[in-house]
Image (spheres, grey):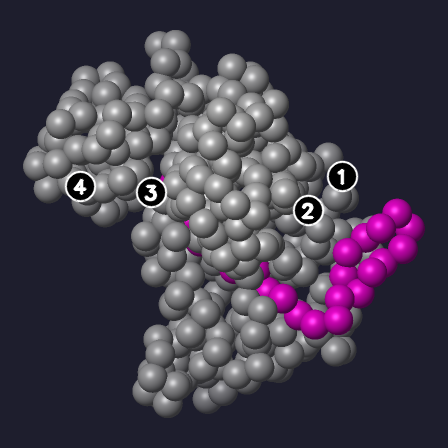
Amino acid sequence: MADIRVPKLNNNDTEYLVVEWLVEDGKPVQAGDPVAVLETSKAADELEAAEPGHLHHVAGLNTWIAPGAVLARITPEAVPASAGAPVVSGALPASAASPDTPAAPADVPAAGAPVITDPARALMDALGVTVAQVTALGLPIVRRGDVERLAGSAGAPPAAGGHAGADDAHGRAGADGGDPGQARAGGDPSRRAGERAGEAGSGGAAGTHPLSRVQRAVARAVTTSHGTIPAAYTAVKFDVGPLLARTRGLSREVRRPVGLAELFVQAVAALHPAFPLFFASVDGDRARPAEAPRVGVTFDMGQGLYVPVVHDTGSLREIADTLMRYRLAATEGDFRERDLTGANIAITLHTDADVILAIPFVFPGTVCALAITSPQPEVVLGEDGAVTTRTVANIGLAYDHRLINGRDAALFLAALRMELH
């Protein structure tokens, strides 16, 4: 008999939600088969069987479970129900969750009925969507994004004063963005209303808005950063007009969309050999350089800040492929923990039309975060004295002052400018 124990999926959470069993209790599995889906504050991850046998559930559906706890057991052969009763001590029921974690129902739904996640149920209450309506979707698990799409197609308005529950990993959307507190505007009004309802939380007192699980994870990262990293900031002005002109030809060349994000990821990664400390981590009074650049890029459309990681930076096509995949994942809420871990430098994108300055926090475990702001027209005098215009952006570097000094930051930004030209 072998136990399937929950690994530590990230540094933000002390427990995860069991949102789906992919193999029924008592059914056979092969080594490497995915058996369950766990939801963290940022993503959803599949856990796999390490060896063949028959799977026996230990944790209940919609219960909280801590890293190291037993999720399931694998036996060489099927075990009668009386002999293989689940050992519930390995799981954390909703009542054992941390005080700031929304409770989740531990009961198993009736046969044929979908599992409705807490965020989806809370948004249903806020938008007036019924259980019968979501059941008609024919989905085994109904998530917040499914409720949003259903409400949007039916034109269901938000309930007056209603707010939905905490965010759901599979219902999140994202786009290039930066600081988690930065406001967003635009988009479909009914969708924006659903997003605001989903972010606000349910059951809060009048005038209060409980943070979603995603935003609580952001809050922990920000608090850790500001509490442990003495950060400084340097910004310079880049003429990005030539870069923007190049993107059109590069997009045709690699047959993928290429913009400032792709070009900056490529250029930042190329500086790793010359500036290894900018990709390092601080361990007490020692720096630990990274063997290779792994560039995190921010995505945010108001439902939470995500920083998926570009591991393969060898070619512009690989980078464009990865960022396109991440944009689709952000739209569909399909991030996995492996997408979100391992960055050793971050690029934060603040390309909303009027953003001229953005100061990101340094993500815990890294030393630097590069901020790219919106391109802006600027009037300048040409060499002949004639008035002309160019397109500029303020490019800033937030850095851990324990390891990086202002002169180092200026040299890095100067080298980055040269790399891009």
Query: In whole angstroms, how far apart are the C-alphas of marks 4 and 3?
Result: 17 Å
| Circle 1 or circle 4, nearest the eye | 4
Q: Earlier in the sequence, mark 4 or mark 2?
A: 4
Residue 110, percent from left and from top: 26, 25
Taking the spot 75% from the left edge, 43% from the top edge, the residue there is: 229
Disc 1 + disc 3, Cβ < 8 Å = no
User: Which residue, as the protein is rendered here, is positioned at the far left?
Assistant: 154
Q: Is residue 116 magenta?
A: no
Q: Is residue 205 above or below residue 5?
A: above
Assign the C terminus to one quadrant of the image: bottom right
Dominant SS of magenta comes to loop
- Local SS, label 1: helix
Residue type at mark 2 is Pro
Query: In whole angstroms, how far apart are the C-alphas of marks 1 and 4?
Result: 48 Å
- Local SS, label 2: loop
User: Which residue, as the protein is rendered here, is positioned at the far right?
Assistant: 285
Which residue is tagged 1?
228
Q: Nearer the viewer, residue 130 or 349?
A: 130
Query: In whole angstroms, how far apart are the C-alphas of marks 2 and 1?
Result: 8 Å
- Local SS, label 4: loop
Residue type at mark 3 is Gly
Q: Is residue 228 left or right of residue 30?
A: right
Which residue is tagged 3?
171
Query: In whole angstroms, how far apart are the C-alphas of marks 1 and 3?
Result: 32 Å
Q: Is residue 189 above or below residue 47?
A: above
Taking the spot 68% from the left edge, 46% from the top edge, the residue there is: 364
Which residue is tagged 4?
138
Q: Which mark is on residue 364?
A: 2
Q: Is residue 258 left or right of residue 238?
A: left
